[in-house]
Each structure stands twice: as structure tokens, then as C-alpha cells.
Amino acid sequence: DQQVKQNSPSLSVQEGRISILNCDYTNSMFDYFLWYKKYPAEGPTFLISISSIKDKNEDGRFTVFLNKSAKHLSLHIVPSQPGDSAVYFCAASAKDDMRFGAGTRLTVKP
Amino acid sequence: KAGVTQTPRYLIKTRGQQVTLSCSPISGHRSVSWYQQTPGQGLQFLFEYFSETQRNKGNFPGRFSGRQFSNSRSEMNVSTLELGDSALYLCASSERTGGNSPLHFGNGTRLTVT
């Protein structure tokens, strides 16, 4: 069962604009959420995380928003750069259980 | 610190064979997890080891097994390979077990079963 869903397999944005990647989850027990970025031929790298006690966490150009009532989180990248082109995975965890979404391929066009 | 190292990077096997993949975690990391990545399926959790003990296991058949050594290095074994086992296998380490510790991934082993 897909407890973590990324419904957009791909997203294309213009350099300098905002990229918004979305993620939905079904398990209300998840209390920690993470975003990973993956380039081809490399493993995913940790990007940013948020605890369920917060609704926003910011790190430079990257901001993650959490809406617990809607069981939805999003990653905002502002401004988007061509080097941000990668596959982005969201992950949700509860104690010992971490689940990943299927990923969204972001393409930032110069 | 050196990152997570996975060997080999690529493997080609035929159906029915078995395969062993190796993972060396970041120094000091005692938790090692394994994931399978296939197109459209994201990262599917296989199992997690902490201090040589399997702490958690995903929904995979018993053909998939693993172990962790006293130096935290881990191996994953797949027996009686099937075509559907073709995937990228990722190993990740973290300082502690539990879901609140970010994972550090290796570059994966690309397994092709023919």
C-alpha cells in the first residue's frame, strides 16, 4: 500500500521561478517528514526535514510546509536553478517505519 | 568522513542464481537499511539492521535476506533470482535507529537479471 504518494511524476519550471513539489500521506502516525534529492547514478541525499510539531521549516532556498489536517506536505524551491534538476523523494516516518514516495522528477529550464 | 560505499556498482545475473551485495556505512553509524528502487515505485524498504540485529523488515519474500557484522558493514543476499528483481539496490546508514534520523545513502548497486 502506498502510504506516501507523490502524484506528479514530473515537473518543469523556468529558472528563477518557484518549484513546488507535493506529497500526501495516509498514516496519521507519521511524525517526521523528510525530502531527499537524487541525481542520476547517485544515491539520494538528504535535503530538509520537518517534525510534526511544526508547520514550516526553511533552509536557504528550500522550505518545507506541513499541513497535518490535510496530511499533505510540500517542498518549495525559490528561486529554482538548473542544478536543482533531479528526482525528489518525500519520506514520512513513525518510530521505526520510514516510507518513501515514488518521486517527482524536477526539470529547471535555463 | 567517507560516505556510504556499496559494491559492486553493477551486476548482471541470470534467473535462478543468487547474489550478494555489500555495504560499508559511514564510520560511527550503527544503523544500516536497504532499499529497492524500481521505476515508478520509489524506494521500497527491505530491512534495517542495528548492532548486528535486524530491527525491521519490509514486505519482501524470504529470498531477500541480510546481515550486519560487528564493524557495522552489511550484506544483502537475494537467492533464486527472478526477472522482477532487476532494480537499483540502495544501502543507507544513520547514526541511530528510528525514523527521525536522516539516512545517508550510497550510490547503489544496479542489478540486472536476465
Image: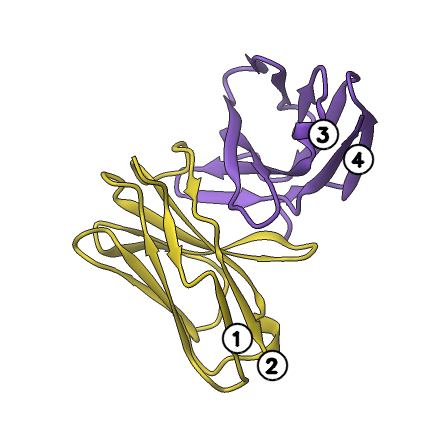
Chain colours: A purple, B yellow
Q: Pointer 4 and pointer 2: residues touching (CB < 8 Å)? A: no
**Which residue is denoted by mark 1 in the rendering?**
B12
Q: Quadrant of residue A104?
A: top right
Amino acid, disc 2 = Thr
A16 relative position to A87: left or right: right
Q: CA distance from mark 1 to mark 3?
A: 35 Å
Numbered disc 2: what chain? B
Depth-wise, is mark 4 or mark 3 nearer the camera?
4
**Residue at the image point whose x is 71% and y is 31% from the top:** A22
How many residues crowd around disc 1 within 10 Å: few (fewer than 14), some, or many (20 or more)?
few
Residue of label 4: A11
The residue singled out by tag 3 in the image is: A21
**Where does label 2 land, which residue?**
B114
Say whether marks 2 and 1 touch (CB < 8 Å).
Answer: yes
Q: Residue at x 74, y 25 (%)?
A: A20
Residue A39, how many percent across, how many down? 60, 42
Closer to the camera: disc 4 or disc 1? Answer: 1
Residues at discs 4 and 3 in contact (Cβ within 8 Å): yes
